[in-house]
Image (spheres, rainbow, N blue to C red):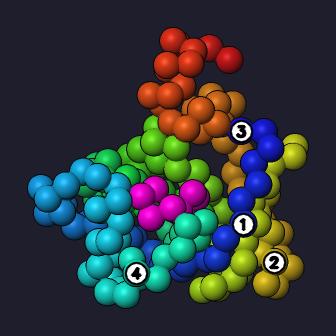
Amino acid sequence: MSGLCLQGRARVFGDDINTDAIISSTRKRESLDPQVLRQYLFEHLSKEFAASVRPGDILVAGKNFGCGSAMEIAVTAVLGAGIPAVVAPSFSRTYFRNAINNGLLPLVCDTRSIGEGDVLSISQADGISICNESNGVRLEPEPLPPIMLAILSAGGLVPYMRQHGSFTL
């Protein structure tokens, strides 16, 4: 994942956002296409959210993001909307793994200094860092293990396995 450089507008949600709040489980009966699912993103929390998302926006949440069921479409819908990363103080274990496996960057750090619409820059040099360009605050998320960085760099677990055939670094 070397050379990581993302910049986007913060889209802020609170604590305990469950997968059914990200996208209703009933939507997976209609389609599994990310471009279809994206239009229903956070529909029960904010009816206008999906229409207002711009590619490159970065989700920022409170603790326990992605709790609830293990629906993989909760990651698929986020990626379908062009959102490359989610920043939160904690994630449900299943959402975190689904994010890695599908190429969505989950970053664990304190998000209290990030407001709605702030411009965030995420880069990697010696480690991943987040700079809130709107207020100058620099955040250092928890480091990701090298294998997770390699999976993310490949675009997810399936592309990683196609490239490497096994979990070797």
29, above or below 156, in the image? below
Query: Is residue 100 shown left or right of residue 144?
Result: left
Callout 3: SS: loop
Upstream in sequence: badge 4 or badge 2: 4
Q: Evaluate whether residue 167 shows in this view.
A: no
Residues marked 2 and 1 touching at CB (< 8 Å): yes
37, above or below 32, in the image? below
Which label lies toward us, 4 or 1? 4
Which residue is rendered at x = 54% and y = 25% of the image? Answer: 160
Query: Is residue 157 shown left or right of residue 107?
Result: left
Query: Alpha-carbon distance for marks 2 and 1?
Result: 9 Å
Which residue is label 1 attached to? Answer: 7
Upstream in sequence: badge 2 or badge 1: 1
Q: Quadrant of the C terminus?
A: top right
- Picture quarter containing residue 64? bottom left
* Amino acid, disc 3: Met
Residues marked 1 and 3 touching at CB (< 8 Å): no
Query: Alpha-carbon distance for marks 3 and 4?
Result: 30 Å
Which residue is label 3 attached to? Answer: 1
Magenta residue span: 79-86
Residues marked 4 and 2 touching at CB (< 8 Å): no
Upstream in sequence: badge 2 or badge 3: 3
